[in-house]
Amino acid sequence: MGIVLFLIIFGAVFALGYPIAFGMIMGGIAYFITSGINLSTLTDIMAIQLQAKDVLLAVPLFILASNIMNDSEITDKIFDFVKKAMGPVRGGLGYANIVTSIIFAGISGSEIADVAGIGNIEIKAMLDDGYDGPFACAVTCASATISPVIPPSIPMVIYAMLTGASLGYLFLAGFLPGLFLGALEMLMVFYLSKKRKYPKGVKTPFRTLLSGFIRSFPGLLAPVILLVGIYGGIFTPTEAAAVVVGYVILVSFFIYKTLGLKKLYKILIKTVMNIGYISFMIAAAFVVSYVMSREQVPALITSTFMKWGLLNSKWLLLMSANVLYFILGMFIDVSVIQLVVIPMLLPLVQAVGIDLVHFGVVTTLNLMLALDTPPYGQTGYITSAISGTPVGKVFEEMLKYWIPLEVLALLIITYWPSFVLFIPRLFGYRG
């Protein structure tokens, strides 16, 4: 009875359009009451579990670092340098868009932060230079997909918390897939630029290019500090995020002089608002996890998959997981999918022998693909609002060219685990 009531309330809240975290909490309250469990246990689960997951401290720090870089114009300078470096190449701003996302990926760890932050700069530059709105929006959406795949990655932090997989090795595993996706997207830019006769860039004199590099160098150094700190064994991921926050504050204050105390205060308020709902969602997900574990739902799912024969092959299970992620991602927030679905899939993944680090990269890319896919694709709506392009035109461009490209990358990453695990194994991973 308790689990049925939980699912009814959870589904009703979602159907009515209320924040899904409230559905988790309200369903949890109903379950605890009908099961005769003291409601104080619910708050204990949320508070104690959230406090115990110290790796989650990295999430607000990555968000804060990306907000400071965006609002203090560091990303503007990086994009300006990359744009000039492209030279007289047809479709140069499309390439610059992708390269900037790869660089920014080393700080933000979030696709939404990429689109809402540097996407504003990139789209405006492309529209001013004569590119059409749907292409400018679509390449911005697609390139932002790289951000959570290349380390650091907020979805990977949450995945590591849920599964116990090594966050350091997850970060390492994202490098090659992220760069590979970027290379595929550059091929698409090349094809569409030739087909549609997009404008060429302007050749920049070496002295001007060098000057641009010097101006952007302090910003370019931020992801280097973070990654060298983590993989040099100097910092944990959380400590590295804190160091980078301190670094970008100092750079913005004393080198670029684009950050003051008032602006920093506003950025801190903005960051608190960004992470408030994420923290509440994660805490609520611990309640769902408790309910599902108490009702032995993961064991039931495992036995069902065994009956269907889906545990006879890891490749078949990977395909099933990808299809499930893809369908859910069209209608449900990515955070919900991570926090609710991954704990249920975990026993299946372990039972069939799929490497958790490999599965983490597959999961991350698939869920980021969901942000580009209608009708729920948030990146489409954000870029549409930035550019004034009808959202239908953005999704049409995405579905025609960019979504198939991302699906191709996902298939290769899914069924070529050695490619994903190549760098982690160089660093001693034995998975």
Image (cartoon, helix red, strand yellow):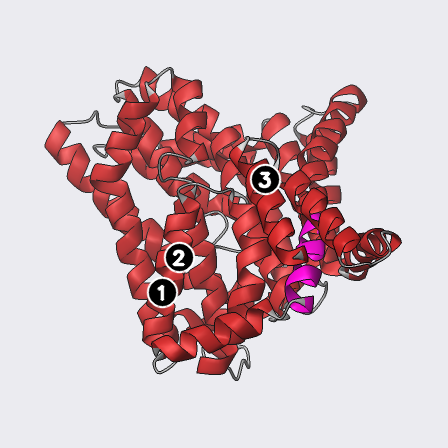
| Residue with the most extreme front position | 1
Residue positioned 55% across, 54% down in the render = 338
Q: Which portion, as a residue range, is magenta? A: 283-294
Residue named by callout 1: 320
Label whose residue precedes the other's in the sequence (1 or 3): 3
Residue 304 point in image, percent of width and height = 44, 73
Residue named by callout 3: 219
Inter-mark Cα distance, 2 to 3:
39 Å
Looking at the rendered image, the quarter that the N terminus falls into is: bottom right
- Marks 2/3 in contact by CB < 8 Å: the verdict is no
Inter-mark Cα distance, 1 to 3:
41 Å
Residue named by callout 2: 324
Label 2 vs label 3, nearer the camera: 2
Residue 275 point in image, percent of width and height = 69, 39
Q: Is residue 245 magenta?
A: no
How packed mark 1 is, by other alpha carbons closer than 10 Å (few <14, some 14-19, many 20 or more), is: few
